[in-house]
Amino acid sequence: MKNQLAGLMKQAQAMQRNMEKVQDELGKTIVEGQSGAGMVSVLMSCKFYVSRVSIDPSLMSDDKEMLEDLITAAVNDAVRKAEATTQEKMAGLSAGFAMPPGFKMPF
């Protein structure tokens, strides 16, 4: 059991290092959210940092409320894409983490 626990600790340390690497990658991964058939676009990192908002010039003469709605929709689209990308990258981290036979978590 002691060897299994030592092996489990090594796996946990490797998983921690991998998680830090993935977190760093997510900060550099950019997704694009769009609305209005691409008339409004938002670039956002998977850490939810918005780096750019682009608005088609033809929308500048339209009503303010519609433009606000399109910006909101584009940001929400970017958030969904960032969450999906994050979930995809994080799912691979726990795939190789095997618990010893009979090991039960305390909860």
Image (cartoon, rainbow, N blue to C red):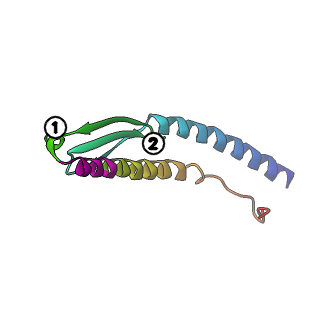
Pick the quarter of the image with the C terminus.
bottom right
Q: Position of residue 92 (x, y in %)?
A: 53, 50
Does 22 sit left or right of 42 as displayed? right
Rendering coords of residue 64 (x, y %): 24, 46
The amino acid pointed to by label 2 is Cys
| On screen, residue 26 above or below 73 | above
Q: Nearer the viewer, mark 1 or mark 2?
A: 1
Q: Are marks 1 and 2 in contact (CB under 8 Å)?
A: no
Q: Main secondary structure of the magenta part?
A: helix
Check disc 2 and report the residue beneath it. Answer: 46
Looking at the picture, tell me which residue is in the foreground, 92 or 6. Answer: 92
Classify residue 59 as left or right of residue 52: left
Judge the density around disc 2: few (<14), some (14-19), many (≥20) Cα neighbours within 10 Å.
many
Q: Which residue bears the numbered disc 1? A: 57
The residue segment tinted magenta is 63-73
Residue at the limit of the structure toward the front, as seen here = 64
Q: Earlier in the sequence, mark 1 or mark 2?
A: 2
